[in-house]
Image (cartoon, grey):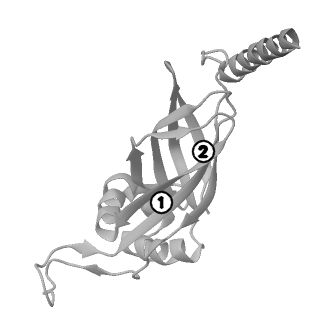
Amino acid sequence: MKKKLVLMTVLIFCLSVALISCVTTQVKPTEKNFITPKVTLESFSVPQYDGYWYFSSKVKPTKGAAGNRGAALPMSFLFNVENKNPYPILLDGMVFTIVFDKEFSLVTYNNQDEYWIPAGKSDQVRATTLITARSALLSLLVTGGFKLKAKGWSPWKALETWWKGVPEGTTPVDITECSFSFSADGVSRTLPYEIKAQ
């Protein structure tokens, strides 16, 4: 009876050690076994909208200093990041440019925050940026002036159309020049993505 009890105890112990070693053995990340994470856009929103307006520095404000100032347009993008790897990965950077009407690049977003995505799981990452009518005007005049002229648009008309159309969902918003950087135990990848927001 004692022999059976001792034998059973040893057998259970050995089986437990074998099972634990199987569970804790992880796949080591390599260049060959790294699976490209899937990145999709869950949602796009304008979290706060105060209309379209612009004041020249010649206009005397009720309070504060005069200056060339315009309405803010905050934009929030919620991304799904799916890790199909059998090991956790670190999202350690994302860069993208926001384009209105399919050809007018207005702002570039750059985030170096770090997010761990568990093995075989998905996580969500929010990217929120803000552009003002003043900064958009300067960008248009420097980089988009010829495109506007070719379309017969004035910068002021384009800004007003976008500031009203983006919150309403009538202005196309695209994410271009987009890349997400991932790493896992010495393996690093920067991967391109093209995403349509609306």
Separation of marks 1 and 2 at Cα, in angstroms: 26 Å
Does the image show residue 154?
A: no
Residue beneath the point at 62% across and 54% down:
41
* 14 to 151, vertically: above or below: above
Q: Quadrant of the C terminus?
A: bottom right
Residue beneath the point at 45% across and 43% down:
95
Locate residue 191 relative to residue 147 in the image: left or right: right
* 76 to 188, vertically: above or below: below
> Label 1: few (<14), some or many (≥20) within 10 Å?
few
Q: How many marks?
A: 2
Q: Which label number is shown at residue 95? A: none
Residue type at mark 1: give it.
Ala
Q: Position of residue 148 (x, y in %)?
A: 44, 62
Q: Which label number is shown at residue 150? A: 1
Does the image show residue 192?
A: yes
Residue beneath the point at 69% across and 17% down:
21
Q: Position of residue 32 (x, y in %)?
A: 66, 15
Residue type at mark 2: give it.
Glu
* Circle 1: element type: helix
